[in-house]
Image (cartoon, rainbow, N blue to C red):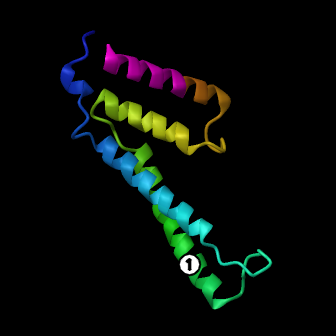
Amino acid sequence: MSNISRRSLVADTDPAYAAVERFKSMYAEHGKSCAAEPAKPNGKAARHTAEYDAWEEANNTAGDKAWAAYEKMISTQPKSLAGAAALVRCYLDSDKREYFIDDESRVLLNTLYGFLRNQMVA
């Protein structure tokens, strides 16, 4: 192994993992909420109904929680190589629609992720 200590590979107490898992959980909850949007029999949104208003409020809350978890995740300092790799991978995976990451940054982040993964198995 290179001059990277074994301790830097261990992620069991890495706050990055908790941040990644919290974001994934909140993102999934928001996705479930979005999928539960009330609809009329014709499939169009049932706007201007009490049911829709309640759903919209709950959906906005779920979205706010997911966004807060995302901001926490991207600002969490990892304590291990595995934690750093988890953060990079989750960040890349969370931007499937390519809203935040430009092409050059995506290449760089994938390169860094590859390096981190290689260091963990070296």
The image position of residue 120, as x and y in percent, is 32, 21
> Up-down: is 85 above or below 33?
above
**Amino acid type shown at disc 1:** Glu
Residue visible at 66% across and 41% down in the picture? 98
Q: Residue furthest bottom?
A: 50
Location of residue 31 (image quadrant): bottom right
Quadrant containing the N terminus is top left
Q: Is residue 63 visible?
A: no
SS state under label 1? helix
The image position of residue 32, as x and y in percent, is 54, 65
The image position of residue 109, as x and y in percent, is 52, 28
Quadrant containing the C terminus is top left
Q: Which residues are magenta?
A: 109-122
Residue visible at 72% across and 82% down in the picture? 47
> Up-down: is 52 above or below 2?
below
Location of residue 117 (image quadrant): top left
The magenta stretch spans residue 75:
no
